[in-house]
Image: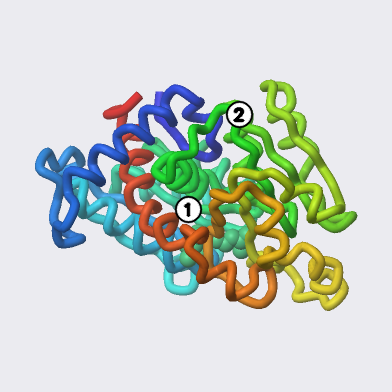
Amino acid sequence: AVRNFLDLSDAGGNAIAAMLADAQDRKAARAGWPKGKPDADAPLAGHVLGMIFEKNSTRTRVSFDIAMRQLGGSALILDSGTSQLGRGESIADTARVLSRMVDAIMIRTDDHAKAEELAHYAHVPVINGLTDRSHPCQIVADLLTMVEHGKALPGLEIAWLGDGNNVLHSILEAAGLFKFNVRVGTPAGYEPESEFVELARSAGSKVTLTNDAGEAARGADVIVTDTWVSMGQDHAEAKLAAMAPFQVDADLMALAKQDAKFLHCLPAHVGEEVSEDVFESSQSVVFDEAENRIHAQKAILLWCHGLLG
Ligand code: CP
Ligand code: NVA
């Protein structure tokens, strides 16, 4: 069967653990190399990844491209603005055409159902590069970053502050797979979808939902936040006002464990969801996290091609 990666559960805990190990090995093996030089084994030599972007991106776009180069292959981009998708060609036809031309497809889109439809009609692996519902590739990079910084995943206390969004959904999915706990601090009305909370809880993770930022942060091993206004959402004043008490600032970080790390998928809005002193502090590992998108993506691509897990 074709291996799609629309959500973390498509791979499961064992395969993601294999991805994390492979990512660490490949990252270590190429330390100091030029970014575009292929890994010695070039496992995806000759392979092409097609990337569909219906939303903006810096990290996902560049890291998938560089990941493919490092695996010996290449990537190409279809922007909704310049491809026939932007003129109404169907997802179904796009999927069938691209399946004849590329070896895997990554899609970033507003509606998760479009990614599912693409996977349904494609004959090659489809990877979710962010939808309104989830951002699984980001969380593989986040897990890698936590592990690299000495955080063993089982039993970890992760605090999420701010908006209960797509990135949090994938963290909750990972919690169930890796048996860590999540304290979610959001304003009332901005909680994550209950489906993801239930998924984590049914897998044995403790998920705390609170409207008190301090309660979420207290004793945490890792503090994570994200933009208060995701792509496609309204820049509503009422939402920003509700989010204000959930800014990750020095006082909030001081409630977490002394060796706690700060994560943010980026792009950041410094002065909104995170204060400048926390963002620039030694506890902040956001640029390691950004780099790890490359290493995580390589492992995801290898898994999709049946070369891992
Ligand atoms: N974190 C992330 O997905 O960044 P981009 O939107 O720049 O791809
Ligand atoms: N939650 C953000 C993540 C961006 C990488 C968004 O969906 O815009």
Q: Residues within 10 Å of mark 1 (few under 14, many from 20)?
A: many
**The disc labelled 1 sits on which kind of residue?**
Ile
Q: Is residue 265 left or right of residue 223?
A: left
Which label was assigned to residue 155? Answer: 2
Camera-side mark, 1 or 2: 2
Q: Is residue 127 left or right of residue 263?
A: left
Q: Is residue 13 left or right of residue 240?
A: left
**Residue at coordinates 59% horizontally, 75% vertically from top-left?**
276
Q: Residues within 10 Å of mark 2 (few under 14, many from 20)?
A: some
Residues at discs 1 and 2 in contact (Cβ within 8 Å): no
Q: Is mark 2 within 8 Å of ligand 1?
A: no
Q: Is residue 143 left or right of residue 213?
A: left
**Residue at coordinates 81% horizontally, 75% vertically from top-left?**
236
**The disc labelled 2 sits on which kind of residue?**
Gly
Q: Mark 1 or mark 2, which has the lower sequence index?
A: 1
Q: Residue beneath label 1, please?
A: 107
Secondary structure of residue under mark 1? strand
Q: Is mark 1 within 8 Å of ligand 1?
A: no
Q: Is residue 140 visible?
A: yes
Q: Where's the N terminus, which quadrant?
A: top left
Colour scheme employed for the rendering of this structure: rainbow
Q: Is residue 121 visible?
A: no
